[in-house]
Image (cartoon, helix red, strand yellow):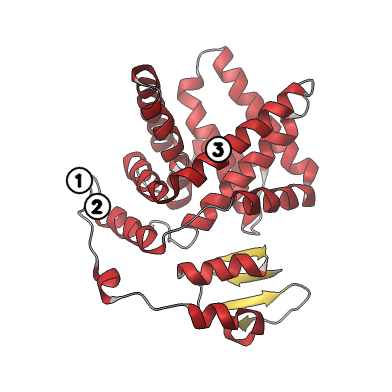
Amino acid sequence: MFKIIGIDGRQYGPVDAEQIKRWIAAGRADASTKAQAEGSQDWKSLAEFPEFAEALAAKVPPTQAERTHELPPHPQGGERLATAVQVASIERATIDVGSCLGRAWDKMMGDLWTIVGISALVWLALSASHAVYVGIVISGPLLGGLYYYYLKKIRGQTAELQDAFAGFTLTFVQLLLASVVSGALIALGLALCVIPGIYLAVAWCFALPLIIDKQMSFWDAMELSRKTINQSWWSALWLVVVCGLINLGGGLLCCVGIFFTLPLTGLAIMYAYNDVFGAIPAKSA
């Protein structure tokens, strides 16, 4: 297992060697990327680890066409969205469902009761909000905050209870708009022909974490999520389906299992998100 310092200056891991090889292939890590092996205190470049020599040698530099490829700017934003989509498009990110679930299981077992407890608190608040008809207002901020908490756990950062409710203080309006707009369009797609609704539900599954993690506007985040997932839509669908089945199984266990399956699947989805978008820097303050 290894930790690395990403191109955004953040620490990622611990992850296995295969995950780092995928990052090398995607261009998110190179020979100069600093890494720390489990059990060691020393940070060394990936070039100093013999297990990555083949992956580094096989990495072909992007062509000039890839480096200069431009996408038309989004009318609401722009250059930042176009740049992010360009990065994601060149990298051709894929989603490894088994790896995401395996890492999610390891992370949850490493701090089981804290993660389960905080997740349960958020989900109970979400359920209560629908009971009193305010769910449409706070669902987005609640889920966005929970994703933010999971991401901090995944990245080895200090994650506390207030992080799980950060959606109300960091990007409340954008999370609210994303939840309402995407929910309405998905419902319309399901009502018209089912398939468009399913497509949009999968395509926008990274919109909320993009908003709170990268400080993006709701439409930019929805578009970036959709355009990126288009490259690996079937693997994203498989992740969503598997997570749904796991949660269904948890619900059938006297509804108690759901308190364990929800954080497991939430972490798995955030591992997939982090694999795809972790190297893209957040909006500058």
**First in sequence: mark 1 vs mark 3:** 1
How packed mark 1 is, by other alpha carbons closer than 10 Å (few <14, some 14-19, many 20 or more), is few
Q: Kindly state the secondary structure of the residue where label 1 is placed.
A: loop
Depth-wise, is mark 3 or mark 2 nearer the camera? Answer: 3
**Residue 27 in the image: x percent, y percent?**
45, 70
- Identify the disc placed on residue 78: 2
Whether residue 273 can be seen here: yes
Do callouts 3 and 2 mark residues in contact (Cβ within 8 Å)?
A: no
Identify the mark nearer the N-term, 3 or 2: 2
- The residue under the point 36% across, 39% down is 218
Q: Quadrant of the C terminus?
A: bottom left
Structural distance between the alpha carbons of marks 1 and 2: 6 Å
In this view, 245 is above or below 107: above
As helix, strand or loop, the secondary structure at mark 2 comes to: loop
Decide: marks 1, 2 in contact (CB < 8 A)? yes
Disc ID at residue 75? 1
**Residues packed near mark 3 inside 10 Å, few (<14), some (14 to 19) or many (20 plus):** some
The three-letter amino acid code for the residue at tag 1 is Pro
The residue under label 3 is which amino acid type? Val
x, y percent for residue 68:
24, 70
Kindly report the distance in space between the C-alpha atoms of the residues bearing marks 1 and 3: 30 Å
Q: How many marks?
A: 3
